[in-house]
Image: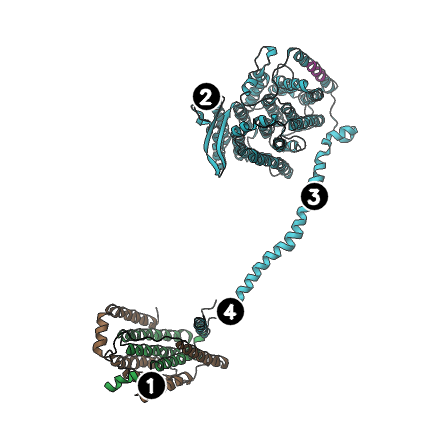
Amino acid sequence: MVEQVPYINFAWLVPALPLLGFLITGLAYKRLKHNQAGIIASTMVVLSFLVSAALYFVLQSAGKDSATVTLFNWIAIGNMNIPFALLVDHLSLTMMLIITGVGALIHIYSIGYMHGDDRVNSFFAQMNLFTFSMLLLVMGANYLVLFIGWEGVGLCSYLLIGFWFKNPAFNYAARKAFVMNRIGDLGFILGIILLFFTFKSVTFSEVFSQAATLQPGAPMITLITLFLLIGAVGKSAQIPLFTWLPDAMAGPTPVSALIHAATMVTAGIYMIARSSILYNLAPITLNVIIIIGLATALLAAIIGLKQNDIKKVLAYSTVSQLGYMFIALGLGAYSTAVFHVTTHAFFKALLFLGAGSVIHAMGGEQDIRKMGGLRKKMPLTYFTFLAATLAISGIPPFSGFFSKDLILSKAFEQNMIVYILALGGALITCYYMFRLLYLVFFGEQRLAGAHPHESPRVMTVPLVILSVLSVFGGFLNIPSLFGGDSKFSAFMQSAVFSKVSEEMTLSTEIGLILIPLILLSLVIWFAYKTFVKKAMLPAGDEKQMSYFGQLVYNKFYIDEIYIALFEKPFGFLSDFFFHKVENTILDPVVDEIGAATSRFGTMVRRLQPGNMSFYLFAMVAGILLFIVFILII
Amino acid sequence: MKEVSSAIQLIPLDNYIMLSVALFSIGLMGVLFRRNIIVVLMCLELMFNSVNLLITAFSAYHSDPAGQVFVFFIMIVAAAEVAVGLSIVVMMKRNVESVDINLLNRLRW
Amino acid sequence: MVFLFYMLSAIMIISALLIVFNRNPINNVIFLIVCFIAMAGHYILLNAQFLAVVHIIVYTGAIMVLFLFVIMLLNLNKAIIPHKSRATRILAVITGGIFFLVLIAATRQTIEIHPRYPFTSDIGLVKEVGRTLFHEFLLPFEMSSALFIAAMVGAIMFGKKDV
């Protein structure tokens, strides 16, 4: 693609600026004091955001939909030609703006949150590295550059989850996240290999133009899309690779906000949306996606009902919302899914940052049974949290309403069962989110001796900005029912090719909006009654719960099943190899080789005793042999 | 003199070769045999001389004067070498108090 | 003439054997001198007059005297020299014998070489040797003076008590 778009070549700045921030804070991490690392890191991300916004205008004014910026020729072996190129089109621009925008706010928030930590410089270095990798992921023009970013974010996730590495439980959580990601990556790599095998290229434009000529339902396409799906399942925490996400809450709260709410976990959805043409050709895979997404959404929502740690509740709600995005993808409504990614980034980041604010105020306490009555002590946090909770529940006119409703209506058009189950999940979401809200902010303060105070300005300003976005962000995609023109979907159409139309008919729409609205209001009132009026606390002790309650509280014992199925056999195998093979066979063999060489050397050393007569003898004998040799031959 | 010079044609070259080889191997035997450095050096001189004889014989038979000039140079080199060699022997005597060649085994590890 | 040749050879070989098998170093020097004089006789037989004279002057007159001086300096006429083990001595003799045989066998395989120049017995005269030396071999001749300087310096260096 010829670049006739002026200034588009500055696209390399967008990932390069966070990389520069990483290098500066990473190399000078012993010398930066106070808030300097945080300011540098945040500045870089803000600059990146400005450049992304400028690129949007540049693209707009040139009248084009997309532009490729080739940085350098990367791999050129025989027929395989893979340049290191960045693709700037509507889909990647959306993701770029989300990553840099929300990321910048979270960076600024972390300046206040991580203040005083003794490794704060490394923290900001790793955050910038993460931003760089994520940007590379969304800006890549071929699957390999995407994969570089994919691996990079996996690495940074490991680093940041295990940031407080002195605690071995946190290290375990970080390892778990990384290993589960790797399992997904294996599928992803296989998918890329098959892709290259089929299409002889991994660049998006070439693959998609070739794919258009293929039959839908071709077995090769199904295989490719399934393998890519495995990668997305690992990265976006779907069944069965989702247990790492709740454990990842061991990391600092800004990490949870950035990585596990707004950006990294949405990488899988981005990848599938990018490959929309391929997925349109594989209806089997799309059905699989719907099933996985639905199951995940429901399972996570149910588990979230009984969790008592504020971050765990939010983690399960993230998994659940990701399930919703997968449902949207499976239904063929790719731009809807991306829209939900956008709004989810807003309100989930806000929820996490608000939770961080609460944790910070309560001096590190994370159990919601011990919190309460924070509404009057931290009004700003309360209002922003309330805005986010309303958004995630899908109450109009907040942003979550627009995106979730769009998904539900698409489900309604295609499959009634999916619609009912998804609606049920939405109701459960609303219930546990409001449970969280009421338990934390309403009622009497249950923690004795704590003096909760409002957070410093550097932490509350991002909260406010995000709440504005959560409230008004939905207006990006107002359907025609309300007089809007679905700007977002139209924007996406150049990049993502949805199977279904993104519009809704009038009558179904009204029904679809009113019914959930009524049900949701019922749920909210019920939650209010339970947790505020009756002031019922969740059981402090497991044994007080019913049998089903215990099951849910223990996350359906999925972690334990995985440990028994996978970890123990691997541990056994590893022990076996270590003791039986390494210590008994390999080590002695290697040692023996060394010892044998040493003994041989001792033998040979006797050839040089040092006395002259022996040397003279040897010389004469040698000459004799030589002459005899010449004579004979 | 004429009689002497005609003797060259009477004695076949093979005799000179055999004589020279005999002297060389006797010298070699002495080098391997004796333990006194000075005697070893003397046997070495014997080997040099056997070679000198051979070259001179060849040059006389082929009427090539270059052979005798070469022998002359060999003698020069042998003289210089003996001078240096004997001074080394003196130094060795000073260090090890003996002239036994097996006592200089510092070459070992 | 042939008789002269054989007698000189006999003297040479016998004195060489006596060098090897005699224990006293002074005796060895004497026998070597006898050997050298016999060799000078051989040179005269071959009409290499210049070489014969130089041989007597340099070898017998200078080098052997040097040997003698060193032996006397080191006080070696006492029988304090240890001897090698019997096995080594026998082995040395055998090796020498084998060497002799091998070289003789090598000469059996030689081809006949015919002389290049017409036969003249004048090449051993001083005039001829001098002409060849100063015409064809002038550079090596001059270089040998450098060789002597090096040898002298080396000998003096080694002789010092404190380096």
| Residues at marks 3 and 4, CA–CA distance in whole angstroms | 54 Å
Q: Amino acid at mark 4?
A: Arg
The quarter of the rendered structure image containing the C terminus of chain A is bottom left
Residue C50, by quadrant, is bottom left
Write down the residue under mark 1.
C34
Kindly indicate whether the residues beneath marks 4 and 1 are on one polypeptide chain. no
Q: Tell me which chain appears brown.
A: C
* Chain letter for the cyan part: A
Q: Bounds of the magenta span? A: A515-525
Name the residue carrying label 4: A606
Q: Amino acid at mark 1?
A: Val
x and y, in percent, of residue A552 in the image: 74, 29
Q: Is residue A121 above or below residue A497?
A: below
The answer to whether residue A19 is left or right of residue C138 is right
**Are the residues flagged by discs 2 and 1 in contact, CB closer than 8 Å?**
no
Residue drawn at 66 percent across, 49 percent down: A577
Classify mark 3: helix, strand or loop: helix
Q: Which of the marked residues, 4 or 2, is nearer the chain's N terminus?
A: 2
Please give the residue where the numbered disc 2 appears in the rendered image: A58
Q: What is the three-letter code of the residue carrying label 3?
A: Pro
Q: Residue at x 68, y 44 (%)?
A: A571
